[in-house]
Amino acid sequence: MRFHRSIPLLRLIPDDTKFDFMRFRRISFPLSAIASIAAIVLFFSHGLNFGIDFVGGTLLEVQSKSEAADLAKMRATLGGLGLGEVQLQQFGTPRDVLIRVSQQPGGEKAQQAALAKIKEALGDEVTYRQEAVVGPRISTELLAYSAIGLMTAIFGILVYLWFRFEWQFALGAMVANVHDLVLTIGFMSLFQIDFDLASIAALLTILGYSLNDTVVIYDRIRELLRRYKRMPIPELLNQSINSTMTRSVNTHVTVTLALLAMYFFGGHAIHSFTATMLFGVVLVGTYTSVFIAAPLLIYFGVGSFRSATAEDEPEPQSAAPRKA
Amino acid sequence: MLYISRWKAFAIVMTTLIVCMFAVPNLLSQSTVQSWPKWAQRHVVLGLDLQGGSHLLLEVDTGVIKKQKVEQLRDEVRKILREAKVGLVQAAVVRGETVEVRIRESDLQQGLTKLRELSQPLGGLLSATGQRSVEINNVGGGLVRLNWTEPAIIERVRQAIDQSIQIVTRRVDDLGTVEPVIQRQGIDRILIQVPGLGDPQRLIDLIGKTAKLDFRMVDQTMTAEQALASRPPPESEVLYGTAREGRTPYLIEKRVVVSGEDLVDAQPAFDQRTNEPVVSMRFNASGARRWAQATTENVGRPFAIILDNEVISAPVIREPIIGGQSQISGSFTVQSANDLAILLRAGALPAPLTVIEQRVVGAGLGQDSIEKGTSAAYFGALLVAIYMLAAYGIFGVFAVVAVAFNVAMIFGVLSLLNATLTLPGIIGIVLTIGIAVDSNVLIYERIREEIRTGRSAISAIDAGFTRALATIMDSNITTFIAAAVLFFIGTGPVKGFAVTFGIGIITTVFTAFTLTRLMVSYWVRWSRPQRLAVT
């Protein structure tokens, strides 16, 4: 029964860490600033690899009926159709090819005509696994909705945090949010990952996760603020992060495991989605909560309300039995 | 916190089991479930990306509707002014989106009073705003401009979409497709989803036709070539034959003898003499009467059958057609005769529809996605379970059990809502597994912390739960806000992600507050730990 009586078996992080996270802000803030600027520069220089959801056009996923698709031949066939730029890309097995044709001038009907032309040219040599045509009107709308959606999400979360915590927390979380989004978009620009509706889903999920993490730490900070009236803020923040460290690590390991399983076994249809999530959730989200969202509170003057009641004696460190 | 009364425990277990039960129909075959009551049959619908099929988004051509509306307004203005015998300087004409009429100064007041009758208060929800249908502008010098107000146009577009949905539904149903979804989207759009349809071209062709059918007489006062060279008589116009026929021009009278609205039925058939595919039709009483009269008066003259401004055929009337039966021949194939019959039966669209988005997934890709999605989900779940057992021992077992029920509950809720499961939806479930354990981690870590401050096992567990649940609430609500936003902006597969992710958050909070607590509470009662070891 000894086994049953002990919780931990595997510990990646020792208990009672006393790591000084706050000192790291002298490194993490400039680092994040540089990374953010780099991401913005990338966004403007390389741009995003917008999928047809946002720029319109035609996308086909075809499978060659022979052993391997003859890309050169297909390129020649499709290039001669006068449809402008035609992108072909091996996709998964050597038989699978992804064909992308940019939006045709001439409104909604021209897009349909382009699809018909392509299918006529390729004929029976391939099977069509997927086809999508997005007209100019829809693509413009989708882009606008997505942008509005991201803003709404950030705003909604801001308002919620403002009600639940102090305004400093809401502001800190929002800065952290924007930081996460900027870096993830930079990552997508750097690797030219398809930016489509699924990417918006990925971005919003990253937002949610990163906040989840931030909120757990903030929650602890709030608790300690109430308990220790005189502890200097940097020390208090440090203790908050250190005491939630094991939880952060365990949670991120499990989420990473789930994401890795999807990355390796989920097929190439969701590769870019999971890759973005891995970057956003695992790398950026965690780092942000610890090194950006928490230290920011120092600058926003969190805990200033405590000074009014400073005559209160700090509670003893060892936990006196509280109301259970 | 730890003590859970007997009836509460019962309620928790029952709720969990009932929600899980709703997932059961998904595991059984369709035929087994069929005999069950309707409410128990609810199941998860596979999205088009998983079962293959076609997704089309159509938009009604509002330009055409505006044009029809403004022409209608012009006719009404002419009629009302004529009946009131108002003196005109210039008859009503259409200029862009407005109707212009020049009334003699002496009759202006009377004319304006009459014209105001045209402007109806708008019904429905808009009536409270005092909006009227027509805006009348007295420019001065007898010139009056009239145009439809914006709400009147929107109202008309709405009606046109309602009509179109009915007609499109009839057309799609006649194709013999399984469970098509046809619904309005926004003001001027129609969404059509047809599972299992791998090549939507025929569907698009069927939907893309307005199918406005007219029977009119051919004008023989001059040949079509003469009319093209000079100018057709005012009562006639030049129309062309179908591409199959080589686009022969015809001079056709503008007056419509019988139109598609008078049709009762249309069926594909074979001509008895030539054995060629034809479409045979039956008119209603008034159509039959007009058709009988026209054919009696015009024996020996050709008439034209016109579909969407294209002359399908122009046969000569050999004898009066009395019975209201008629047939169209026009070098059809069996399929095209069949398609035309479908179109005629369903009726004409009030305005053309344009495809603005089209997504098709083949059945093979859908199957692949299901297989890959499920294997990824199993692997993810397995890895997470192993880690949790390694990290938390017996408490890990509780976490794994809670997560298993959590996933079963997600499927239960999805079934209850008859929600659609998409590939991103599967990702949403796997991610839920990832965060569902987070709630357990939060609780357990909190318990460990409390133990290290020197509390007894039971007191630590109690305090751990109390503190951690507040945090779980806050962190999940923020994530839920993101999921909710995604649900409202997302379409298709992405919406599927938002649904499973959102439901997953709710079930996660539920299991953390109830199931995990219940298990730990019973374990504590059973093993009565004095101290929990913390290494």
Image: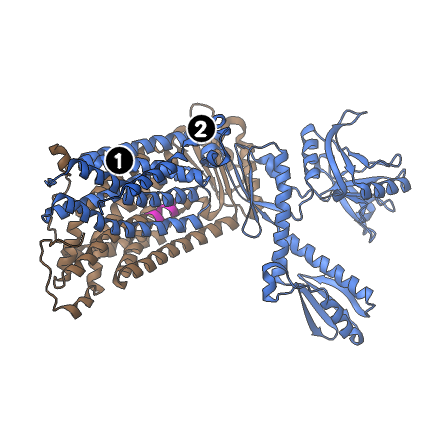
Return the residue nearer the eye: B518 or B265: B518
- In the rendered image, the vertical position of residue A106 relative to residue B37, given as above or below: below
Q: Which mark is residue B179?
A: none
Residue with the mark numbered 1: B400
- Disc 1: host chain: B
- The structure residue drawn at horizontal position 35% and vertical position 49%, both measured from the top left corner, is B480
Q: Is residue A186 visible?
A: no
Residue with the mark numbered 2: A70
Secondary structure found at label 1: helix
Q: CA distance from mark 1 to mark 2?
A: 48 Å
Please tell me whether mark 1 or mark 2 is closer to you in this view: 1
Lateral position of residue B120 relative to residue B520, left or right: right
Lateral position of residue B387 relative to residue B153, left or right: left
Q: Is residue B442 visible?
A: yes
Q: Is residue A199 magenta?
A: yes
Q: Is residue A98 magenta?
A: no
Return the residue nearer the eye: A169 or B124: B124
- Disc 2: host chain: A
Q: Which residues are magenta?
A: A198-205
Secondary structure found at label 2: loop
Q: Position of residue B355 (x, y in %)?
A: 57, 44
Name the amino acid, label 1: Val
Query: Chain A rendered in what hue?
Result: brown
